[in-house]
Amino acid sequence: MQIDPKANTTLDNYKLLTSLVVPRPIAWVTSRNERGVINLAPFSFFNAVGSDPIFLIISIGRGSDGGKKDTARNIESVGEFVVNLVTEDLIGAMNISAAEFPPEESELIAAGLHAAPSALISVPRVAESQASFECKLHSTQPLGVYTLIIGQVVMFHIADDLVGPRLHINNFAPIGRLGAPSMYCRTIDRFDLPRLTYEQAKKL
C-alpha cells in the first residue's frame, strides 16, 4: 500500500509516523522558567545524534493554544535543561507530567518526584531517574509547528549499580514509545549480534 502524506490529515500522518518509527526513547525534560519554576515533560521525538561533542535532539510541538510549550520557551530563555530517562517504575509519574500544567505549577511536585542538583547547570534533574544528561543549549531550529532543540551533554548522571567495567551499562531498561496515542514497550528482551567485518560479510 502506498500512502501519500499530502492526501492525509496532519493527525493521520502523525499516527503513521509514530507507529512505524519505533521504539522511540523518551526524553523526560526538566527545564526552569525565569521565575524559577521547574517544568517536567516527556517527549518521544528525541535521540542522540553525536558523541564528539555529545549532542541530543528533542523536537517539541505546539501547545493546545498554538503557542510554544513551556519546555521550549524555558530552554530558549535559560539555555539549559536536563534529559532524564524513564524506567517502568516511573511510568505513572511520567504520565502525570504529560498533562498540560500551567507555567506557574511544577509537574515535578504534582508527580510526587524530587529535584536533585545538577553539577554544571542550574536546572535540576529528577532524583528518581536512573540516568540523566545535563545539557546546555547549542541551537534551535524551527521545523513547521515544531521547535528542534539541539543540546550538548556536559554531564552524565548514572545510577552506580548500572555501571560495569569499562563503562558498560548493565540492567538498564528504559521504556520506549510505540505509537499514538498511548502505546509503550519494555526494553528487557535483548540479544547480542556482533558486527561483521567486510571479509566476514562477503563469506556469508
Image: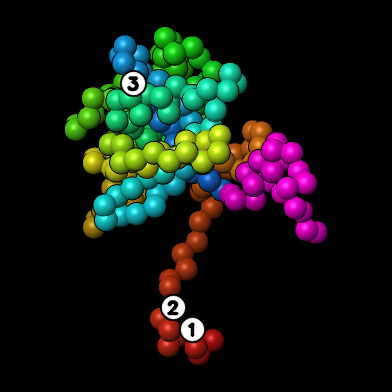
Q: Amino acid at mark 2?
A: Leu
| Residue drawn at the location 69% of the way across and 43% of the way down | 13
Q: Residues within 10 Å of mark 3 (few under 14, many from 20)?
A: many
Q: Secondary structure at mark 2?
A: loop
**Quadrant in which the N terminus is drawn:** bottom right
| Residue drawn at the location 31% of the way across and 37% of the way down | 137
The image quadrant that residue 168 belongs to is: bottom left
Establish if 114 lies above or below 143: above
Mark 3 and mark 2 lie on one chain; the one further toward the N terminus is 3
Give the alpha-carbon distance from disc 2 to disc 1, as whole Å: 6 Å
| Residue drawn at the location 43% of the way across and 84% of the way down | 198
Establish if 56 lies above or below 51: above
Pinpoint residue 52: horizontal percent, then vertical percent: 27, 56
Establish if 184 lies above or below 38: below
Q: Secondary structure at mark 3?
A: strand
Query: In this view of the protein, which residue sits in the foreground, 49 or 61?
Result: 61
Determine if the magenta segment contains residue 3.
yes
Check residue 201 in the rendering and tell me which mark sits there, or answer none: 1
Check residue 196 in the rendering and tell me which mark sits there, or answer none: 2
Left/right placement of residue 187 relative to residue 48 reads: right
Mark 2 and mark 1 lie on one chain; the one further toward the N terminus is 2
- In the rendered structure, are the residues bearing label 2 and label 1 in contact, judged by CB atoms less than 8 Å apart? yes
Give the alpha-carbon distance from disc 3 to disc 1, as whole Å: 50 Å
Establish if 84 lies above or below 51: above
What residue is disc 3 on? 32
Q: Residues within 10 Å of mark 2 (few under 14, many from 20)?
A: few
